[in-house]
């Protein structure tokens, strides 16, 4: 009868070991018993970039990358995007169940009442240079909240954790909006508690002198759907940063700042801004084949394409294409969509992309919608950070209460020198540091 075990013979010693297989994994620590002698540390795995290592158990988000399936707490993303609001999905991600009506009302009310920033935080933001990138401001300001809420370090107190979670979800749009207003030189707008989460964000971004901001309902709903799509994506780079930093019991503001910093990179959330720059560079549909040639030759990457997990169409990209049509009915069509569609059409028939299973990811079309809605490309990654904060916090909370988790601390294979003789200053010769790969 088939057994859920793996038998390994260590040819160095001729010893055989039988390891349990659970959930399609073996435990890396089970390898440690495989030694060549008492002095041997024991076998480890080498997995740069965690290509094949599960670092946690999680019941939040399920992805089947081969089939292009994404589920939050067991619900398909398509269903949630069609029927829910972002705050409803935030509740689901954090607590595991969809809220009933009174629960959603009270949850929405609580998040809304945490949207205000202290004046000290506002002054902190005012100190940035006029042209500071919104993500630089967002990362620093979220970290600075640690100074405003020093009690947040009590990470083992469930009530305290929940309070910080609500504060972070409530304040993230305010921080992002203020970074934008700072960048364009307009006065900051305070939150309006009459408005929904996304309407209020639009209010803080775009209110000018009118007494009451009224958001276009189609655009507010499209933004809400985009927030739902970006809310969580299991163990991506920024979530791993959140878990890793949080595993040292750093407070959630500092851990979220670390996660947002990871998100800002161009291979991760920063890709949406890069996609727009790429479309600008391509300029028109006619230039698409020449650009794809540069990609094939390895001179540039096709931004917004490819994914570590999805080897099929990213289900979020499909919903975004649908949302784009709704937005364009209000704003008019963003001509960049045509370049994007042409890139996708040719790439999906091209052997380079087909053989590598490279498909459009969530960042490919999101920027085109954001731009049509009036966002500057520098804001795109902040628009990703607002909803992903929910995912980071859900994953952080899960990590904190998981008895199997410890401080995150990978191993290394040391490749440097050992036991060198120390040279006094007069014996040293200048090394050509410019040639050294540092
Ligand atoms: N353009 C051209 N070639 C690519 C691309 C791309 N966008 N993505 C992957 N490849 C090639 C890569 O060069 C490699 O080719 P080869 O086997 O000949 O060396 C092969 O495909 C496998 O790629 P990889 O680099 O091993 O894949 P990875 O899992 O390490 O990287 C990725 C995943 C998302 C970083 C990468 O696909 C990429 O850089 N994409 C562009 C940036 C982007 O759109 N990022 C957003 C990701 S989705 C949202 C998010 O996570 O924030």
Image (tube, rainbow, N blue to C red):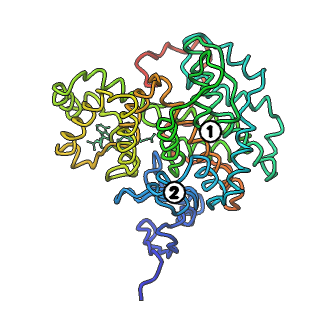
For mark 2, give the secondary structure. Answer: loop
Q: Where 132 sits versus 170, above or below?
A: above
Q: Which residue is mark 1?
A: 197
Q: Residue at x 62, y 39 (%)?
A: 196
Whole-percent x, y for residue 120 in the image: 78, 21
Whole-percent x, y for residue 80 in the image: 50, 55
Question: Whole-Å distance between the Cαs marked 1 and 2?
Answer: 47 Å
Label 2 Cα crowd, 10 Å radius (few <14 / some 14-19 / many 20+): some
Q: Quadrant of residue 205?
A: top right
Mark 1 or mark 2: name the one nearer the start of the chain: 2
Q: Where 204 sits versus 398, above or below?
A: above
Q: Quadrant of residue 258?
A: top right
Q: Quadrant of residue 190?
A: top right
In this rendering, which labeled residue sits more in front, label 1 or label 2? 1
Q: Which residue is mark 2?
A: 44
Whole-percent x, y for residue 207 in the image: 59, 21
Q: Nearer the viewer, residue 123 or 351?
A: 123
Dot label at residue 64 = none
For mark 1, give the secondary structure. Answer: helix
* Outermost right residue: 151
Tell me the quarter of the image containing the N terminus.
bottom left
Q: Nearer the viewer, residue 396 or 44?
A: 396
Q: Residue at x 57, y 46 (%)?
A: 86
Q: Nearer the viewer, residue 64 or 103?
A: 103
């Amino acid at each position: 009868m088939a057994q859920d075990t793996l038998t390994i013979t260590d040819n160095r010693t001729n010893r055989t070991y039988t390891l349990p297989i659970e959930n399609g994994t073996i435990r890396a620590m089970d390898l440690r018993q495989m030694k060549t002698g008492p002095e041997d540390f024991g076998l480890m795995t080498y997995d740069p970039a965690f290509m094949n290592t599960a670092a946690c158990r999680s019941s939040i988000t399920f992805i089947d990358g081969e089939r292009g399936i994404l589920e939050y707490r067991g619900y398909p993303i398509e269903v949630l995007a069609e029927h829910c609001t972002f705050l409803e999905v935030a509740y689901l991600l954090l607590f595991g169940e969809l809220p009933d009506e009174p629960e959603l009302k009270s949850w929405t009310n609580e998040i809304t009442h945490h949207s205000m920033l202290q004046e000290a935080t506002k002054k902190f933001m005012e100190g940035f240079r006029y042209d500071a990138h919104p993500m630089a401001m967002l990362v620093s300001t979220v970290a600075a909240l640690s100074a405003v809420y020093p009690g947040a370090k009590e990470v083992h107190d469930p009530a305290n954790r929940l309070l910080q979670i609500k504060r972070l979800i409530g304040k993230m749009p305010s921080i992002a909006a203020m970074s934008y207003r700072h960048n364009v030189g307009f006065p900051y707008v305070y939150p309006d508690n009459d408005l929904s989460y996304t309407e209020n964000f639009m209010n803080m971004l775009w209110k000018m002198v009118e007494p009451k901001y009224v958001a276009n309902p189609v655009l507010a709903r499209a933004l809400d759907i985009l927030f739902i799509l970006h809310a969580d994506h299991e163990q991506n780079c920024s979530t791993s940063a959140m878990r890793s930093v949080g595993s040292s019991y750093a407070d959630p503001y500092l851990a979220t700042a670390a996660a947002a910093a990871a998100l800002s990179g161009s291979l991760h959330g920063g890709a949406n801004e890069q996609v727009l720059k790429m479309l600008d560079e391509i300029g028109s549909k006619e230039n698409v084949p020449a650009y794809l040639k540069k990609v094939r030759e390895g001179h540039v990457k096709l931004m917004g394409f490819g994914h570590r997990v999805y080897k099929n169409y990213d289900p979020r990209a499909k919903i975004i294409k649908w949302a784009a049509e709704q937005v364009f009915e209000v704003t008019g069509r963003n001509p960049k969509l045509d370049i994007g569609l042409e890139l996708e059409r040719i790439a999906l028939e091209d052997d380079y992309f087909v053989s590598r299973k490279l498909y459009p990811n969530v960042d490919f079309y999101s920027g085109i919608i954001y731009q049509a809605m009036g966002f500057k490309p520098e804001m795109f990654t902040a628009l990703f950070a607002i909803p992903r904060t929910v995912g980071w916090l859900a994953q952080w909370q899960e990590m904190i209460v998981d008895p199997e988790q410890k401080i995150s601390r990978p191993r290394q294979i040391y490749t440097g020198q050992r036991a060198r003789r120390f040279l006094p200053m007069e014996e040293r010769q200048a090394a050509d540091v410019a040639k050294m790969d540092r």
